[in-house]
Amino acid sequence: MRIRCPYCGERGLEEFTYRGDATVTRPETLDQTAEAAWVDYVYLRDNPAGPHREHWYHGAGCHAWLVVTRDVRTHEILGVELAGGPA
Amino acid sequence: MSETLTARPALAGIALPGRHGTGNGAPGVTLRERTDLGVVAVMARKGQGEALRMAVASAYRATLPDTARYLAGQTVGFVGTGPGQWLAVSASLGGGALAVDLTAKLAGLASVSDQGDGRAVIRIAGPRARDVLAKGLPIDLHPSVFAPGSAATSIISLMGVTLWQVDETPAYDLVVFRSLAVSFWSWLTDSAAEYGYEVVPATN
Ligand SMILES: [Zn+2]
């Protein structure tokens, strides 16, 4: 599998580390009322058969966090963007 | 009792000047440690990218590359190492002088950290330089896609390396962490041996 980093260009998988689901959103508050939202954020994951948005870290290259849209059935990469937005 | 520490090149006593490897004709590459360079990491502060660009242009007559490129200024060159990140390199502002200068001129716009004592820089030049690097570097150095000024950060034999092409010889500058310099040198000379290589005495 190769990932086209928006900064570095196309690179092999060995330069990247998978850093988890990019679709979940961290709850804004630590308040007790947000407990269910925290459980959802920390533990519950969808398991789609098809395109999925994931965080990948380009640790051996530009050190940017990327959001990679990948079809988990075929490993086809449908899109890559900088997680922090354009620099 | 006090001990006086003196600066010592990373490959002192390791990179032995002379002709090595296969044959005794013209070497496929020359290798030289670049010493006494200023090497400084520069990282843009949040929202200061444009102001930083202008400060660098006026202080050093240099352009900060938006991509992985090396752009030479008057006394300092800047290599793009990531979004909002650069490695500043200078032969004239050696030792800690470059970091002091950048810290003063880019105050509030960028975080500046001296890397000069933490990195080793090796210049490889010659007709077989691409072949030597191709055995470990997972990046295409073909002139149609990697030319003078092109730069990249990647890995060679599990060691992180930042490199850029200097000229069309071709020559490349390779930057590795100093603690890996001897291991990297071992990989490099192993890869170069079949073409014959000449080690040139270290200079900046
Ligand atoms: Zn990258």
Image: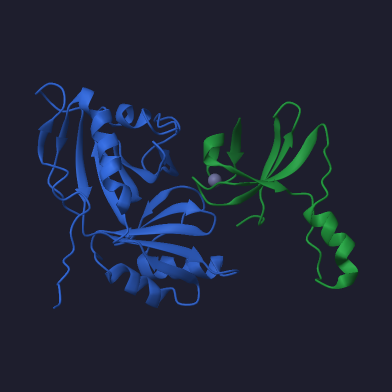
Q: Quadrant of the C terminus of chain B?
A: bottom left
Can you say whether B4 is above or below B9 in the image? Answer: below
Q: Is residue A6 left or right of residue B107?
A: right
Can residue A12 be seen here? The reply is: no
Q: Quadrant of the N terminus of chain B?
A: bottom left
Q: Position of residue A22 (x, y in %)?
A: 74, 49
Can you say whether A33 is above or below A45 in the image? Answer: below
Instruction: Tell me which residue sits at (52%, 48%) in the image.
Output: A59
Quarter of the image holding residue B39?
A: bottom left
Instruction: Tell me which residue sits at (18%, 59%) in the image.
Output: B8
Q: Is residue A31 left or right of residue B52?
A: right
Quarter of the image holding residue B199?
A: top left
Can you say whether B144 is above or below B103 in the image? Answer: above
Can residue B203 be seen here? The reply is: yes
Frontmost residue, B143 versus B136: B136
Q: Position of residue B145 (x, y in %)?
A: 45, 33
Can you say whether B20 is above or below B117 in the image? Answer: above
Instruction: Tell me which residue sits at (70%, 47%) in the image.
Output: A20
Query: How many numbered discs sit on the rendered protein?
Result: 0
What residue occupies the far front of the structure in this picture? Answer: B1
Q: Position of residue B119 (x, y in %)?
A: 32, 55
Frontmost residue, A11 versus B164: A11
Q: Is residue B14 left or right of residue A5?
A: left
Q: Position of residue A3 (x, y in %)?
A: 60, 36
Q: Colour of chain A?
A: green
Q: Colour of chain B?
A: blue
What's the coloring here? by chain
